[in-house]
Image (spheres, coloured by chain):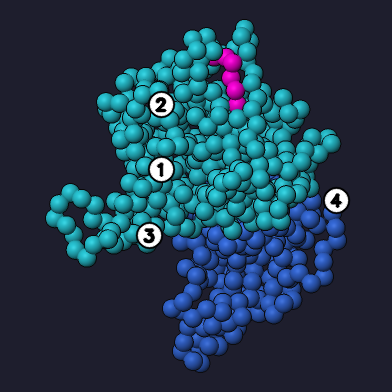
């Protein structure tokens, strides 16, 4: 039974929920404590599995009644055959992956479509900090100091578009979030997070 | 029943496979009668849908929870089974039976062969995990249970869960597999072989015909010492004993006991010898070594017979059944599209963790079963 999406959920979660078709099979890579996955199951009628590396997050996922695997993103994906999922979701986890290209291509193998949510390193506040302070930016979207960040890769919404083009990946849908609202214009400047729906060419 | 736990419990017995309907073992040999010792905790509900079967490890028994009359120590999984615990006996009916070949009430090499009136000894046929599963299925039917709600087990008990769920698909809603793998590796077989050789090289062993005479205590104690080392991690041993000396200021420069760890192994193995039969140790370690879920071909083809939802738990410091070995059957389960959740719990307790890491396991098991309860 599907319930209406609650009002107080995170904007990126709402946009992802709106982006995908209901009642399908999803794999949430780097599902954290399972908040998004449990929304997709409860409110979109999806069936799904999460993959998460953090042990404490696994307890929270199981407490939410989720099926979850304690693994890192890359080894977790290799367990699945081609096209096993309708959607593979990589929300806020891609920047922590070393080989982004391999991970996305692997996600596109396992899933018919891939949803990617990435932080935008070229938000205007980051550009200002870099230009005027001459320091590596710390922003709402990327709140970590350079010496203490889980992020391994730093890129912008524009960079990611170029990456998709170069690798023959189609962007079916795109939306962006900044300061808790959906951003519709000048997104590489004003958005903290870009959300892409990808398919293979 | 006390507030704290399962209170005083008693072992019960069930005899089946009476001649001529003997149990045909995997080896082709037949055996009967078979008596199985078992205990139950909680109450079976009216539609018999709240039963959980737990399997013990190598040297365990049917006494999983509560206290036997006059005993100081409770059953082996008491922190996990009882009112309000992971396996909540206010809700569930928990069953634990002693496995075939053991010496804790179920028919094994130390039992009297009804045809000869003497203990079986080595005339007892070699048994497998599958044979135990077949025997326990009979017990479950005897209790009037068509479908279990859940089954759970660690170490050897985990192998029984894997076997049961693939041999009798649909006979349980969910299954919890802890600290195990789908077949023994060369290292595990080698460790068992050293333990078996320790027993068989004890002059008192007498080809297994020692009942009523002196038991092969030294051999069995040695076998247990090896086992104990494999159940702990280097870290847990370091924390527990370090290089502490036992009752002396300086090392003795002789072959008396110097270190606390030596004393611990001696003490634990001496008490073990009083409670366990050497032949049972031989038979059960063989059963473990023979177990291979992939013996009929690809592992994925075997596991895809299962229909249960799985929770698989492993432990970071368990070097006897390391997590990466569990990952192998988890991978096959995923490939077979089974519903499987898995976690590797960070702990320094080694293989023993499945008995002592109560808090994390309890949370996981409770929440996992709550979901299955809702889904069924």
Is residue A166 visible in the rendered image? The answer is: no
In contact (CB < 8 Å): disc 1 and disc 3: no
Marks 1/3 same chain: yes
**Residue marked by disc 3:** B240
Neighbour tally class for label 3: few under 14, some 14-19, many 20 plus, Cα within 10 Å? few
**Residue marked by disc 4:** A1
**Residue marked by disc 2:** B279
Position of the C terminus of chain B, as image quadrant, is: top right
Comparing marks 2 and 3, which lies closer to the viewer? Answer: 2
Q: B204 left or right of A162?
A: left
Q: Chain of mark 2?
A: B
Q: CA distance from mark 2 to mark 3?
A: 31 Å
Q: Chain of mark 3?
A: B
The residue nearer to you, when weighing B350 against A45, is B350
Q: Residue at x 68, y 77 (%)?
A: A178
The residue nearer to you, when weighing B11 against A79, is B11
x and y percentages locating residue A90 in the rendered image? 61, 59
Q: Residue at x 60, y 43 (%)?
A: B68
State the SS at label 1. helix
Neighbour tally class for label 4: few under 14, some 14-19, many 20 plus, Cα within 10 Å? few
Comparing marks 4 and 1, which lies closer to the viewer? Answer: 1
User: Where on the picture, by quarter, is residue A15?
Assistant: bottom right
């Amino acid at each position: 039974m599907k319930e209406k999406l609650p009002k107080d959920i995170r904007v990126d979660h709402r946009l992802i929920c709106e982006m995908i078709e209901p009642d399908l099979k999803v794999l949430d890579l780097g599902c954290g404590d399972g908040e998004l996955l449990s929304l997709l199951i409860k409110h979109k009628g999806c069936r799904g599995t999460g993959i998460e590396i953090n042990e404490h997050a696994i307890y929270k996922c199981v407490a939410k009644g989720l099926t979850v695997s304690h693994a890192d993103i890359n080894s977790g994906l290799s367990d699945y055959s081609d096209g096993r999922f309708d959607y593979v979701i990589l929300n806020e986890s891609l920047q922590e992956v070393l080989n982004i290209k391999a991970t996305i291509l692997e996600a596109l193998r396992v899933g018919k479509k891939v949803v990617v949510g990435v932080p935008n390193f070229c938000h205007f506040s980051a550009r200002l900090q870099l230009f005027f302070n001459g320091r590596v930016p710390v922003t709402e979207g990327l709140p970590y100091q350079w010496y203490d960040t889980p992020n391994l890769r730093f890129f912008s919404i524009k960079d990611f578009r170029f990456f998709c083009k170069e690798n023959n990946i189609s962007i079916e849908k795109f939306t962006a979030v900044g300061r808790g609202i959906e951003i519709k214009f000048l997104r590489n400047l004003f958005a903290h997070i870009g959300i892409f729906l990808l398919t293979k060419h | 029943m006390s507030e704290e736990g399962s209170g005083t419990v008693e072992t019960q017995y069930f005899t089946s496979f009476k001649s001529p309907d003997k149990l045909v073992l995997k080896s082709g040999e037949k055996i009967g009668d078979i008596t199985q010792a078992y205990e139950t905790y909680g109450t079976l509900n009216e539609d018999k849908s709240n039963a959980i079967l737990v399997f013990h490890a190598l040297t365990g028994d049917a006494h999983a929870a509560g206290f036997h009359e006059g005993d100081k120590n409770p059953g082996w999984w008491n922190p996990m089974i009882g009112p309000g615990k992971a396996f909540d006996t206010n809700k569930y009916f928990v069953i634990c039976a002693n496995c075939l070949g053991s010496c804790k009430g179920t028919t094994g090499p130390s039992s009297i062969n009804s045809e000869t009136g003497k203990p079986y000894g080595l005339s007892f046929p070699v048994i497998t995990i599958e044979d135990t599963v077949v025997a326990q299925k009979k017990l479950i039917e005897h209790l009037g249970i068509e479908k279990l709600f859940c089954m759970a087990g660690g170490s050897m008990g985990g192998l029984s869960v894997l076997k049961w769920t693939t041999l009798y698909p649909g006979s349980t809603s969910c299954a919890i597999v802890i600290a195990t793998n789908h077949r023994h590796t060369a290292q595990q077989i080698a460790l068992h072989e050293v333990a078996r050789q320790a027993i068989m090289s004890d002059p008192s062993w007498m080809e297994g015909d020692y009942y009523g005479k002196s038991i092969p205590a030294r051999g069995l104690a040695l076998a247990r010492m090896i086992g104990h080392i494999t159940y702990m991690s280097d870290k847990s041993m370091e924390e527990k004993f370090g290089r502490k000396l036992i009752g002396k200021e300086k090392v003795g420069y002789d072959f008396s006991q110097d270190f606390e760890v030596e004393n611990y192994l001696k003490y634990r193995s001496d008490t073990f010898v009083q409670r366990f039969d050497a032949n049972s140790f031989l038979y059960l370690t063989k059963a473990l070594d023979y177990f291979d879920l992939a013996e009929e071909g690809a592992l994925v083809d075997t596991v895809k017979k299962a229909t249960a939802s799985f929770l698989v738990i492993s432990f970071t410091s368990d070097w006897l059944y390391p997590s990466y070995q569990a990952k192998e059957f988890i991978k096959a389960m995923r490939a077979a599209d089974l519903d499987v959740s898995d976690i590797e719990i960070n702990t320094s307790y080694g293989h023993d963790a499945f008995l002592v890491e109560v808090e994390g396991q309890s949370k996981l098991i409770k929440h996992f079963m709550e979901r299955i309860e809702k889904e069924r």
